[in-house]
Amino acid sequence: MSESVSMELGGRTLTIETGELARQASGSAFVRFGDTCILAAATASANPREGIEFFPLTVDYEERMYAAGKIPGGFIKREGRPSEKATLTARLIDRPIRPLFAEGFRHDIHIVVTTLSVDPDADPDVVALVAAGAALALSDIPFEQPVAGVRVGMVDGEYVVNPTAAQQEQSIVDVVVAGTAKAVMMVEGGGKEVSEETFLGAVEFAHDRIRDILRIVDQLVAKAGKPKREFPLFLPSAEMRQFVDEAFGADIARAMRVTGKQDRNRAFDAITRQEALVRIAGHRLEAHVRPQLEDSKNHDFEKCVKAREEDELRTMVVDEGRRPDGRRLDEVRPISARTGIVPRTHGSGLFTRGETQIFTAATLGSLSDEQRIDGLGPMTFKRFMHHYNFPPYSVGETRPMRGPGRREIGHGNLAERAIAPMLPPAEAFPYTLRLVSETFESNGSSSMGSVCASTLALMDAGVPLPKHIGGVAMGLILKDGRPGILTDIQGLEDALGEMDFKVAGTVDGITAVQMDIKVQGITLDIMRKAMAQAHESRLFIIDKLKEAIAAPRRGLSKYAPRMIVLEIHPDKIKDVIGPGGKVINKIVAETGAKIDIEDDGRVFLASPDAASAEKARRMVEDIVKDVEIGEVYTGVVKRIMNFGAFVQILPGKEGLVHISQLAPHRVNRVEDEVKIGDEVVVQVREIDEKGRINLTRKHPETAKR
């Protein structure tokens, strides 16, 4: 039997239903907001997956083009690999849900979220997040804290929940927040140089709306929720935990205090199962622990070592106020920044922070190079792209490279969001821009390193950025409720800590944020302290960027295309294109320029060199130029008749020089004065009522030439 609950959210109705659709899943929810309809189904496997030491959660966000009344483009008329938007939405759902499952959960959880209908004024991503959280809450899967999420904008100084498309155009904030009734679990978004307080206000506003949504989810669970099943948790034995603490506690403490990443890793690598078998000999817990150590399928030893590492890190940070690499809690690692790294790119930058090193290359293209996005929303065009790569050698590993994964796509999008508000508009800088960040070395905060390297590359390319953009990743270590907030976290602190909070922006405000929590939420007070600490470190990092390049270079690279923008009357567009594209193709063939023409009459000319661009400009201007009486032109004889010669004075524009106007003296035969192909100087004598142009060679001005 179907059950539903509804509430008002931002002036529209949010409805959550269950019981009719996807009934064989462990739990399902059908959510409607405006005309956006999402189905989420959550399913748990009957048996735990063997041989794994991680929580096997998979979130798939399925975009269906029928939801927007579209047929997929291309030759294959069905949906294929997920779009970038679909991948980012799947991450948006996964990140707040994953930390809320109990440690040691080894049953496969699969959440499939399908778009059934899309309203352009109701983004499906946050509706999908609500649907996934409701499906888990309604299921028999042990997920005790329901999750929901909303998007927040700010229009005319007021926060707006789940803003419409028009409101998003005006908004200075775009933030997605997910959380439980008790705490915030995830933040993703940015703004147009907003203050920390404005951002925190958006998070607080969002959390209030999330609580409202979770109240109706609880009502639906009370009416239609399934009883929770018992799932075994695969946790280390108490004896193994005790043995690791006693036998390896001192080794782990020493290894944690080794400052270099590679040296520290070698110290941790020495803590092996083989060494444990040596030390267990004669130990009072030998009878309990030895069988576990000898069983290759039992990974309790490794789990206990990691847990001891986490405890040691908490002790160092919270009790001692020090970090594994010896830094203060609020200290940024040593920074190096350079530009002009390689000669043939249009711009390049190298940013090194500690053991994290990012190289970014900037490429400028014409507006025709922009990316066309044909998704569930209206077709859009994207003139700025940032792509992030993370090869395995950057962390000293080997693995097959199969194209960008979800993490790479997410990090690229975050850096893109951070930089986009500072880019000049197309009217001022008519180029398509692509940035590619290569991670050469990584020990934490590589996504924020790519923001810094991208700033260097853009300025090196001569892109007129008004300000430098810097980024930093903040961390959190909790011990007995006491927080230790870390600036510029490294890989170990990210892996063992409770929070990864990335903040990017200029000296005047925030442009991008991303926060992931590994515990069951944090308070706004901790977020406020982390953001204040991030603000100070961001200013420090930006000063380092300014030392490398104080302002954008005045000229573009000699390898970058030259762009000229013309404005012509829209009625003249057909003249520039010509019948079947004949005219525009001739310009392209003669100059090598790329030509893009907008419906409003803007003409963008892109060429590898300035001379070719200038030649193309002259040709276009000649085409659209109006012929004026009295003007003198150098033309070419195109046709000869017995009554005169037709001379092309501008592309597509011919005039007649009557036989009586060919020379100051009497002319008996036209051929006696001119031949086809001759270049002649003529003056416009008149333009009749039918637009026909009459020329002369008898005017004194033509005689001078």
Image: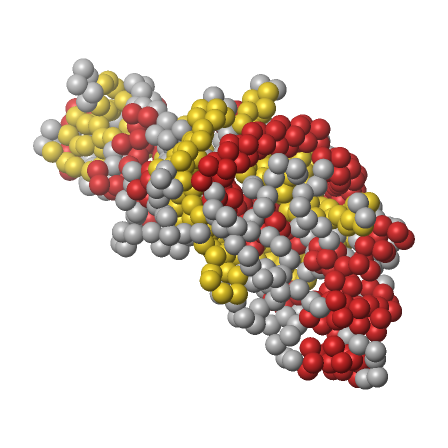
Name which residue lies at 18% across and 15% down: 689
Q: Foreground: 244 or 440?
A: 244
Residue 345 at x, y percent in the picture: 57, 54
Residue 664 at x, y percent in the picture: 23, 24
Name which residue lies at 72% across and 72% down: 301
Name which residue lies at 26% across and 41% down: 581
Quadrant of the image occupied by residue 231: bottom right
Quarter of the picture containing the N terminus is: top left
The colouring scheme, among rainbow, by chain, secondary structure or one colour, is secondary structure
Residue 415 at x, y percent in the picture: 60, 46
The answer to whether any part of residue 619 appears in the image is no
**Identity of the residue furthest to the left in this view:** 642
**Identity of the residue furthest to the top in this view:** 689
Left or right relative to 432: residue 330: right
Q: Foreground: 287 or 111?
A: 287
Quarter of the picture containing the C terminus is: top left
Left or right relative to 666: residue 94: right
Name which residue lies at 61% across and 20% down: 157
Residue 600 drawn above or below residue 587? above
Tell me how many marks there are: 0
Left or right relative to 68: residue 544: right
Residue 103 at x, y percent in the picture: 64, 57
The answer to whether any part of residue 317 appears in the image is yes
